[in-house]
Amino acid sequence: TRSHPFYGQAHQAGIQTEQQRYTVYMTFDLTSPLASDLQVLLARWSGAIAQMMQGLPIGSVEPDGSGAVALDTGEAYELSPASLTVTVGLGPGVFDDRFGLAAKRPKHLADLPDLPSDQLQDETSGGDLSLQACADDPQVAYHAIRDLTRMARGVATTRWTVLGFGRASAGKGQKTPRNLMGFKDGTRNIKEESDFDRFVWVGDDQAWTRGGSYQVVRKIQMNIETWDADPVGDQQDVFGRTKAVGAPLTGEREFDVPDFAKRSGDATVIPQTSHVALAAHENNGGVKILRRGYNYTDGLNRVGLLDAGLLFLSYQNDPQHFITLQTRLGSVDRLNEYIQHIGSAIFFTPRSPKRGRYIGQELFE
Ligand code: HEM
């Protein structure tokens, strides 16, 4: 029953917002060469998102006269807003030569470089625009994406999508959920306001980009059957944490601070190639990212194995932070035996518009 405001916030909703249970994530390719078409689409999307975040239809569900097509498709009609947020992202393609917007490019917005262990597939990578709809009711999230996709007709076509069914990271005050490997995910996520200012929100770029962030998305497939056959002791060494409690291997409780230097015989207690040892800010020159991922499943693969994984979503004020982390993780992380990065894209998510304006309006002024 909760609803989040769309207009007049310091940042777009869906980034720092307490993470909802479900997501529908979709990217689009712009097919129209006209900047004015992009402009109208961003304006229409903004108006519709504001409306849907209040739990309202975007137009008539049952228009007068049986000859009329409904403006709103109706499947969320009379449902609660369910904490819906829709976060709009602009990909590098928005700032290429097509639309005359090159001078406005956010300074770090560029395609991600090839990273170690990448097994990216074209059909789950890239895009000029992204929509991340999150809600506590999957039908509300799906309705939002469906109706926004409808509005894009003639301007942008769908590129790839993922339905996420369980949040896989925690924000402040949230109980830590578990990913599909059965481990708590999000224990040491960014939670403090000061860390948001330092690591998430853009500050030192063109005025229109301030308060925005860079969204990195990776579709990461898990080899579930192989993982399930691995003894729990080994699984704990892969992450560097215990399975049930989620404590670092050097501690007892979930939020105990890991001691990466502690040794037992020749080796450190938290293996140096464990996921947390490689990802922790203590071992990375202080880098932190905001993780906001979701568990997903695509059903079964061609040989009847469970096809599932993590829709990894991170927000940072410089994509280099993600690149630094994934360069390390992709090279030596023990987790690599059980996962493949099969999808990837990057977007800039501008700040929230003032009432009466729309997302990215400064691009056209
Ligand atoms: C921590 C799972 C991919 C960055 C963790 C933790 C788990 C986990 C269980 C420990 C609990 C926590 O502090 O949240 C996974 C799984 C992945 C994955 C299953 C892939 C399927 C990634 C990627 C990155 C990343 C691609 C970044 C490039 C981090 C960071 C931490 C973390 C920064 C916190 C480390 C710390 O400060 O202790 N992850 N992760 N993870 N992960 Fe991942």
Image (tube, rainbow, N blue to C red):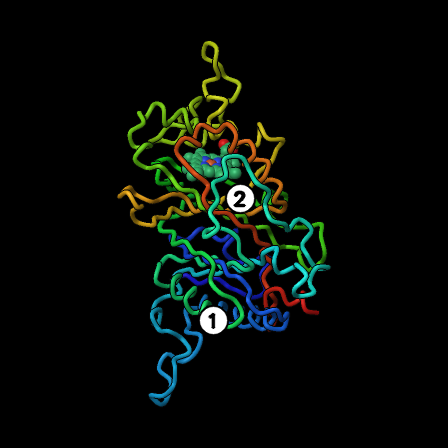
Above or below for 318 versus 331: below
Q: Secondary structure at mark 1?
A: helix
Q: Residue furthest left?
A: 304
Instruction: Identify the secondary structure beneath mark 2.
Output: strand
> Sequence-wise, which precedes: disc 2 or disc 1?
1
Q: Amino acid at mark 1?
A: Gln
Q: Few, some or many C-alpha atoms within 10 Å of disc 1 (few <14, some 14-19, many ≥20)?
A: some
Which residue lies under the disc numbered 1?
Answer: 51
Q: Residue at x 36, y 88 (%)?
A: 67
Q: Nearer the viewer, residue 47 or 338?
A: 338
Give percent across and percent down for residue 286: 61, 33
Front one among 310 and 336: 336
Label 2 and label 1: CA atoms lie apart by 27 Å
- Image quadrant occupied by the N terminus: bottom left
Q: Is residue 337 above or below residue 152?
A: above
Asked if residue 224 lies left or right of residue 349, the reply is left
Task: Say whether residue 157 is left or right of residue 98.
Answer: left
Q: Residue at x 37, y 35 (%)?
A: 183
Q: Residues within 10 Å of mark 2 (few under 14, many from 20)?
A: many
Quarter containing the C terminus: bottom right
Q: Which residue is mark 2?
A: 290
Residue depicted at 57% across the width and 53% down the height:
347
Is residue 67 among the parts visible in the rendering? yes
Q: Is residue 187 visible?
A: no
Could you tell me residue 173's position as x and y percent? 45, 45
Count of numbered badges drawn on the protein: 2
Whole-percent x, y for residue 35 in the image:
64, 69
